[in-house]
Image (tube, rainbow, N blue to C red):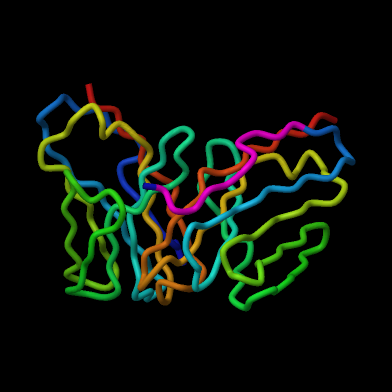
Amino acid sequence: GQQVMQIPQYQHVQEGEDFTTYCNSSTTLSNIQWYKQRPGGHPVFLIQLVKSGEVKKQKRLTFQFGEAKKNSSLHITATQTTDVGTYFCAGLVYNNDMRFGAGTRLTVKP
Amino acid sequence: NAGVTQTPKFQVLKTGQSMTLQCAQDMNHEYMSWYRQDPGMGLRLIHYSVGAGITDQGEVPNGYNVSRSTTEDFPLRLLSAAPSQTSVYFCASSYTGVQTQYFGPGTRLLVL
């Protein structure tokens, strides 16, 4: 079964509000990646976290990797309509086996 | 660079038919993979390859075969299509499995 769980499944926000999606694994991950998929498009790589407790920022996006390397989060500050899409986390479970979360679909009301 | 290309974009099959989904990349990536995407399920790894001549099973390999005769190409074969294989299929590549994965545009498959 799916080893990487992601919540929430959907999130609807008003433009300017913040947004967070959470990713949890039943096993320790070697690394975690985040992807964004626009409606009708393909996943596009955002970032990779490798170290325990790692925090990375990309403009309004903040990514965190938990101390135990079993959870991660993506936080978007002051959402914009261009942030619309589905955000996926993907964890390296073992060897080259990447497991994706089910994704969080973000919609933004102008 | 064209990146990762997939053909066809759309395909309709009847149950029991066979077909091959094509995937090619021109970035000299060693790692290539196939995922299927179903509503509410995210992307599930079908098969992957860490280099020419080497393939391995992912999370949902049943009903699918792959081969990797060259670095550039990684076709996915459905030997006898079933309605449960209706999905969107994405091919991806990266320098190694743990690095950034570049996804192709996807193939939408409908099995009747």
Quarter of the image for residue B78 reads top left
Residue at (27% x, 75% y) in the render: B51
How many numbered discs sit on the rendered protein? 0
Expressed as whole percent of the image width and height from the top left, the position of residue A110 reads 85, 30
Nearest the camera: B93 or B72? B93
Nearest the camera: B63 or A40? B63
Expressed as whole percent of the image width and height from the top left, the position of residue A59 reads 82, 62
Nearest the camera: A64 or B21? A64
What type of secondary structure mainly makes up the magenta span? strand
Residue A6 part of the magenta segment: yes
Nearest the camera: B7 or B84? B84
**Eyeballing the image, is B81 above or below B46?**
above
**Eyeballing the image, is A70 above or below B106?**
below
Q: Is residue A59 left or right of residue A42?
A: right
Q: In this view, does A55 lie to the left or right of B34?
A: right
Quarter of the image for residue A24 reads bottom right
**Eyeballing the image, is B93 above or below B36?**
below
- Highlighted range, magenta: A2-12
Expressed as whole percent of the image width and height from the top left, the position of residue A64 reads 70, 65
Quarter of the image for residue B57 reads bottom left
